């Protein structure tokens, strides 16, 4: 099942050259779920980078504790972030908040995944700026919707 933010707007700031594969950062502490998401995204012609937790994702994005601000080149590095909600250390919701607080990364769409269908959690994530909330396990049809969304943003 897919829950989508009602604004539906895409930013022109997060674009890549036409013909480039969209680059997705997939964050999940569960190796099997992470590999599944990676496989589904690659099947949809996406470039995928994975991170096993929120802190690793922030480091990759240039927002780690030893870096004050995201590097300028990072925005073009990632077109979408898809993260699990329940992770040790930093939840997907906390990761979402950190990304949305960054002036450089706030326009990058963030999709939250969870195996638990908790309406308050879903609405909280969407209100905080998540583009979508998807229930696990993800299916190829879910990823096709994501890819379609990404192509609209990039077009």
Image (tube, helix red, strand yellow):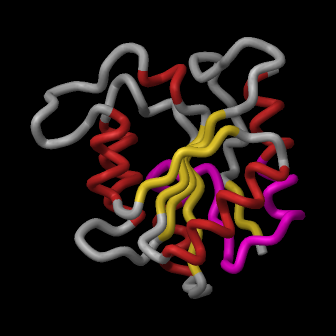
| Magenta span | 126-146
User: What x and y, as percent, mark residue 72?
Assistant: 36, 14
Residue 155, percent across and down? 82, 20
Q: Is residue 88 magenta?
A: no
User: Which residue lies at the image location 66% right of the left edge and 63% below the top edge?
Assistant: 37
Q: Between residues 55 and 107, which one lies in front from this camera angle?
A: 55
Placement of the N terminus among the 4 image quadrants = bottom right
Q: Name the spot of residue 41 as percent of width and height, x first.
A: 74, 52
- Does residue 101 sit above or below 153 in this rendering? below
Q: Above or below — where is 34 with respect to 17?
A: below
Measured from the top left, where is residue 62 in percent x and y? 29, 32
Tell me what residue is drawn at x 76 percent, y 49 percent. 42
Label total for image: 0
Nearer to us in this view, 29 or 154? 29
Toward the left, the furthest residue is 66
Q: Quadrant of residue 142?
A: bottom right
**Left or right of 35, for residue 74:** left
* Residue drawn at point x = 53 percent, y = 34 percent: 108
């Amino acid at each position: 099942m897919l829950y989508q933010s009602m604004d539906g707007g895409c930013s022109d700031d997060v674009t890549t050259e036409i013909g480039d594969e969209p680059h997705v950062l997939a964050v999940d502490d569960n190796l099997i779920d992470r590999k599944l998401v990676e496989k589904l995204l690659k099947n949809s012609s996406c470039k995928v980078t994975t991170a096993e937790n929120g802190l690793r994702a922030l480091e990759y994005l240039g927002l780690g504790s030893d870096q004050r601000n995201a590097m300028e080149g990072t925005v073009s590095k990632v077109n979408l972030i898809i993260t699990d909600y329940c992770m040790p250390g930093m939840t997907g919701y906390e990761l979402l908040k950190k990304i949305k607080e960054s002036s450089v990364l706030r326009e990058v769409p963030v999709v939250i995944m969870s195996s638990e269908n908790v309406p308050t959690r879903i609405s909280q994530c969407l209100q905080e700026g998540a583009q979508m909330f998807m229930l696990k396990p993800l299916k190829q049809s879910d990823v096709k919707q994501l890819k379609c969304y990404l192509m609209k943003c990039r077009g």
